[in-house]
Amino acid sequence: MTRETWATRIGFILAAVGSAVGLGNIWRFPWVAAENGGSAFLAVYLGIVLLVGVPGLLGEFVIGRRANRSPAGALRSLSGSNVWGAWGLFYVVTAIALISFYSVVGGWILRYFVESSLALAGTGPTYFANPGQYFGGVSAGLDAVGFHVLFLALTAIIVLAGVRRGIELGTKVMMPAVLVLLVGLAVWAGTQSGAADAYAFYLRFDAATVRENFFGVLGPAAGQALFTLSLGAGTMVTYASYVDEDRSLAFDGTTIALLNTAVGVLAGLVVFPLLFSLGISPGETGTGAGALFVGLAGAFSQLPGGVLIATAFFAVVTLAALSSSISMLEIPVAFLVDEYGVERRTAVAGVGSVVAVTGSVCALDPAIFGFVAGTLVDILLTAGLTGFLVFVGWVMGRDALDEFRSGAGGVATALSTPWLFAVGALLPVFLVFTLLTTFGMDARLGFWPTVATAAALAVVIFAGVRGEPEAA
Ligand code: PHE
């Protein structure tokens, strides 16, 4: 059977944007930005997206397009080494961890969407009465399990339909809808009474916070950059493996990163005016999973036409979450299809059943949910991206340059050598450093010793990879 490919270039771009744009933009980004210095954080974050995110994204693209295989097969076939093949299994595990928690949040959102749209005809949805209590009641337990399974089933249906008729067609419909609805909501939110205060809060340029606590801001900014660009899980390797024409990966990657950032900023322009119009200060509702639900549900319940706005808003978030969850499910599915010749149908059913269970565990136990959604995912994505970049720099080397240049324009070609140096040397050190700060090492050792440790560890990794004998 011949392997599927994207039907169009825009199809690939939209699928990748669909993967990138998700809960990371709409729920996580506005909060992390507001907490870490507003637009000054935005500047640091943009810097990381540009200097780490885009080159990292291109690293994943280069592996995928070169190998035409999903991560495990790609790493093995390009290196000829079973050790790399085994490391590829890491991405299957990461994908399952990701979708296990993501599908639970997707389920909450789906429930709010269903509740809101059912209420369009009648009185307000049940969550209007007491948003905090309502969220507490449905966010964990059997209710959450039910909606998680429903969300997962929707995800599975799209993935089942395949690359062209499922993922490509689905994101071609979903992404424009997300953009149009979000712009509409932002314009509407701008007319609310709290808009001016909200913009002042969100877009304030609090350089002092960033200056005083630069390294504290760096961690959240880096974590957010990886998560939001879907890096380190193998999604972008998998999607690029379905690209069959030589067009500029650098151009596509930059477009994807720009669109993704624009949606993040736009989401903030929707969320904050709503909260401020009710005098809810974002700090009060607390951060974390509940903020979006409790804070916004409260705002919707007070505003004229709130049910309609709520329906539109939760529709956007549902679509954005779906177009991301399909990209997570596609990783293990593509692995089974590529490596074992399993039929897509069987692969989706198999992986779906596993995630139905692992996700239910997250839905039942908030402590496990918190761990998976937070620390575990941070570690897996950072380690995962480090693996890819070391591979690009130290195993592919020249081949990576060739692949990068094929289809690239003049500017990208000129930047290809610095790019290889960055992904092969600088970025791994940076990522190992972030990993060490996740384990709290900088607090214990101090900043420079942690940098030195990161550099030393990276060199050990490089040497280990170089020492790996090349088979066949
Ligand atoms: N980028 C997605 C979001 O922002 C999450 C994601 C991470 C998707 C990793 C795929 C892989 O919601």
Image: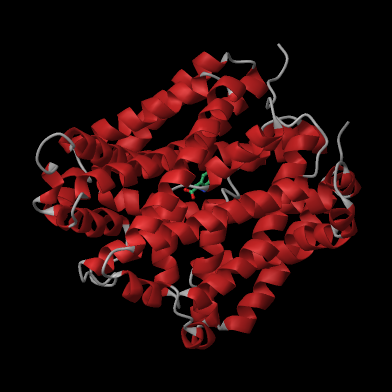
Of residue 21 and residue 108, the one placed in the foreground of this image is 21
Image quadrant containing the C terminus:
top right
Of residue 429 and residue 114, the one placed in the foreground of this image is 114
Horizontal side of 152 relative to 240 (left or right) equals left
Which residue sits at x=58%, y=28%? Answer: 168
Residue 214: image location, x then y, percent: 54, 81
Toward the front, the furthest residue is 191
Horizontal side of 415 relative to 32 (left or right) equals right
Where residue 371 sits, quadrant-wise, is bottom left
Say whether residue 405 is visible. Answer: yes
In the rendered view, tell whether residue 130 sits above or below residue 108: below
Circle count: 0
Horizontal side of 125 relative to 91 (left or right) equals left
Of residue 154 and residue 266, the one placed in the foreground of this image is 266
In the rendered view, tell whether residue 181 sits above or below residue 349: below
Residue 355: image location, x then y, percent: 40, 31
Scheme of image coloration: secondary structure
Image quadrant containing the N terminus:
top right
Residue 427: image location, x then y, percent: 71, 63
Which residue sits at x=53%, y=87%? Answer: 211
Say whether residue 23 is visible. Answer: no
Residue 333: image location, x then y, percent: 55, 26
Which residue sits at x=69%, y=53%? Answer: 254
Horizontal side of 340 relative to 320 (left or right) equals right
Which residue sits at x=61%, y=23%? Answer: 164
